[in-house]
Image (tube, grey):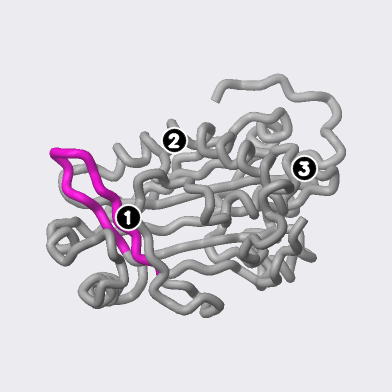
Amino acid sequence: MPLLLALLIPATAPADGPSVLDGLLDTYNDHAHFPLPDIDTGDLRRLEDGKVLKVREVPEDSSQPMRVVGLLITAQPRDVLWLANRDTHYSIAAGATEALLTPRGEWPQIWYQHIDAPRPFADRHWTIDVSDTWQLAKATDGRCWEHWWSLSDDGLAYAKKAVSAGRVPTVSVDTFEDSIYTPANRGAWLMCALDDGRTLLGYHTSVVVGGRIPDRVIADWGMATLGRMFRKVEAQASEQREHYTGGHYRIHGGDGQEMPLY
């Protein structure tokens, strides 16, 4: 899971500048499953300047994991970004094996995911609840969508039953037993359509992978790769009008409705 210099502040804010975005973020935080940290005016202007805003949130409780937060205002429309992010024909997390353990259409979905880590590290795995925050979409008049995940209750036992039953063909029972279950794994993607056609694209995650790898190392890696991850989603979004057509399976938007094919 992926890881400030002072800027000249323009005399006049853009049409969808900090004051509008700040109000939108306030509404977002009132209704999101996982609210964002407070963002000051200077950082909002960084976003308007096309920069990737990176925030490392260090909790007061040292037993809790750090949170890595990234935001970007992109020219790509919200809907094609969402399709690129939710389309299983693409892979944001390379090298991961995953299996849906609940019927499609049931929310929250429960996913088992497994990472084949390079030696000498042990493999990692986890079971997460995954859903979209439909009340957020309603509260923002359809502008903001959130796709979140967090560790499932009794997820390890639930996943073991699935692996033992052969529901995850690429993960054997022995592989399962030799893997480390991550103690913390939660986060979200967010996408808000702005008035000028651009999109506020965001991602945040709090992860502890267990073993001898400190969560600070994972946070460092996440901070370093946020920009690359956002650019990958942007690139995939550019292909969606040609890809999401014909017999493509239907993807649901963050409002719970099926998104029309192009």
- The residue that mark 1 highlights is 64
Residue 120 falls in image quadrant: top left
Q: Which amino acid does label 3 sit on?
A: Arg
Q: Tell me if residue 49 comes above or below residue 63 in the rendering.
A: above
Name of the residue lying farthest toward the front: 247
- Residue count near mark 1 (Cα–Cα under 10 Å), binned few <14, some 14–19, many ≥20: some
Q: Which amino acid does label 1 sit on?
A: Gln
Disc 3, SS: loop
**Picture coordinates of residue 140, whole percent (x, y):** 75, 63
- Residue count near mark 2 (Cα–Cα under 10 Å), binned few <14, some 14–19, many ≥20: many
Q: Is residue 129 left or right of residue 44?
A: left
Q: Which amino acid does label 2 sit on?
A: Met
Q: Which of marks 2 and 3 is in front?
A: 3
- Residue at x-position 41% and y-position 58%: 186
Q: Tell me if residue 220 comes above or below residue 244 in the rendering.
A: above
- Depth check: give the residue in front, 95 or 31: 95
- Residue count near mark 3 (Cα–Cα under 10 Å), binned few <14, some 14–19, many ≥20: some
